[in-house]
Amino acid sequence: MVLVFVEDPADELSQQALAFARALGEEVQAVRIGDGQPYAPAAWAQGLVAAIEDRGPWAVIAPGSERGNEILAHVAAKTELPMAANCVSLALGDPASVVRLRWGGSLLEEARLHGSPSLLTVAPHAVAAEGVSEEIDVVAPSTDPADLVVQVAERVPSAVSGVSLADADVVVSGGRGVGSAEGFALIEELAALLGGAVGCSRAVTSAGWRPHTDQVGQTGTKVSPEL
């Protein structure tokens, strides 16, 4: 059996994680953590650990989102099991074998996960989202004060409108050669005409010309556009 952590049933990355699990040809069970409680990484991870211990899956799969990667990293630390992030394939076996993206997607790495269950997150757009057909159980997060030291107090929506950089089919990116923050007006205009998103290099964000949320690459947003 494969256990999938679903961040939000309507979320495309969560649907991709479910599709990835279905392709393995095994029974798929899905869980969400919490029912309106504030997000606390350690507490949510402990809730997932409890579900793992109760159900005994051979693999635990999470979406390749910030939250999915964070929670599964906590699970790996709590269970002392290896975790692989940004995976594009998983093969059954003892040990299990995964292929994952490294160095901002510039290369593929094959790795073996010793221990059970295998913990992995799915690289964004590694598979197509197919909706949700599974029943999703709600698992309670830990209430241990030690697990609640860090939790989200408030979420402030981004002021950026338009197409999300991570999901964009078209990305128009600029680097130091644009010359200034004002120079990105032309980049923004072209992105708008193409129905795409604006990206930039680390040098641009370091210069303060664009916010870090626009940075593309290993230390920024991972993208997989068609153009």
Image (tube, rainbow, N blue to C red):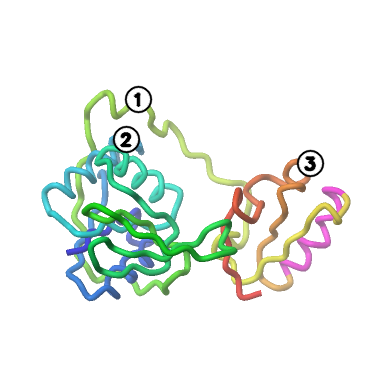
Q: Is the Cβ of the residue at disc 2 closer than 8 Å to that at disc 1?
A: yes
Residue 68 percent across, percent down from the top left: 38, 51
- Residue extending furthest toward the left: 54
User: Which residue, given by chain and number where applicable, does mark 3 sit on?
Assistant: 207
Q: Which is more toward the observer, 24 or 152?
A: 24
Quick check: 50 left or right of 177? left
Is 198 displayed left or right of 24 in the figure? right
Q: Nearer the viewer, residue 148 or 49?
A: 49
Residue located at (39% from left, 54% from top): 84
Residue 116 on the magenta segment: no
Say which amino acid is labelled 3.
Answer: Ala
Distance of label 3 from label 2 (alpha carbons):
35 Å
Which residue corresponds to mark 1?
149
Q: Amino acid at mark 2?
A: Ala
Callout 3: 10 Å neighbours few (<14), some, many (20+)?
Answer: few
Going 29% across and 40% down the picture, which residue do you hit?
Answer: 44
- Residue shown at 36% from the left, 44% from the top: 73
On screen, residue 183 versus residue 162, left or right, reads: right
Q: Which mark is residue 32?
A: none
Kindly report the distance in space between the C-alpha atoms of the residues bearing marks 3 and 1: 34 Å
Which residue lies most toward the right here?
179
Q: What residue did someone put label 2 on?
A: 42
Q: Residue at x 42, y 31 (%)?
A: 153
**49, above or below 173, in the image:** above
